[in-house]
Amino acid sequence: MGLVARALEAAGFPTLCLTAAHSITAAVNPPRAAFVDLPLGHTAGRPHEPEFQREVLRRALAAAETIEIPGTIVDTGMVWSDDDSWKDEATSGLNNGVNSAEGDSRRARVGEPQYQFEEDRVAADAG
């Protein structure tokens, strides 16, 4: 989404990325982003809780108004619950398609964007 956001910004359309994946968002460096500490797949809030979802959007839009430096990621303060135990299950290696007794088997994110195709890198550099 960061690449799309940068292309839209270059065309004159302001953007805001709402993200639950801080490291991924930082790596793709969108013009502005709002972070929520929620499980992936639930970035806009808890299912069947419209007031919580509205609060996510309120805080994200408020964050957008304060961002002056491109690439800024604002933490909205929205959390899934006061108990962080949900993160153990959400980031377990047993949940990302790799059965691993050691836990999280995902590779660490790198600071430099990665591209599937060379054309994508060229397009990103042009933006």
Image (cartoon, rainbow, N blue to C red):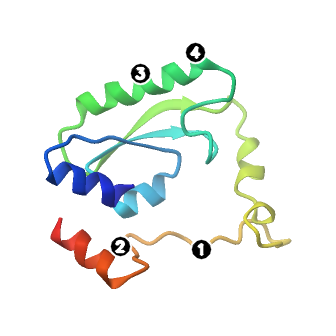
Mark 2 or mark 3, whichever is nearer to me? 3
Q: Which mark is residue 112?
A: 2
Residue at horizontal 18 percent and vertical 39 percent from the top: 68
| Residue 36 visible to an observer of this rendering | yes
Mark 1 or mark 3, whichever is nearer to me? 3
Query: Mark 3 — residue?
Result: 58
Distance CA(mark 1)–CA(mark 4): 35 Å
Along the viewing direction, whichever of 96 and 50 lies nearer the viewer: 50
Quarter where residue 125 is shown: bottom left
Q: Earlier in the sequence, mark 1 or mark 4?
A: 4
Q: Are marks 2 and 3 in contact (CB under 8 Å)?
A: no
Mark 1 or mark 4, whichever is nearer to me? 4
Q: Which mark is residue 51?
A: 4
Q: Which mark is residue 6?
A: none
Residue type highlighted by circle 4? Glu
Q: Is disc 2 placed on a helix, strand or loop?
A: loop
Residue density around tag 1, few if under 14, some if 14–19, many if 20 or more, within 10 Å: few
Left or right of residue 124: residue 22: right
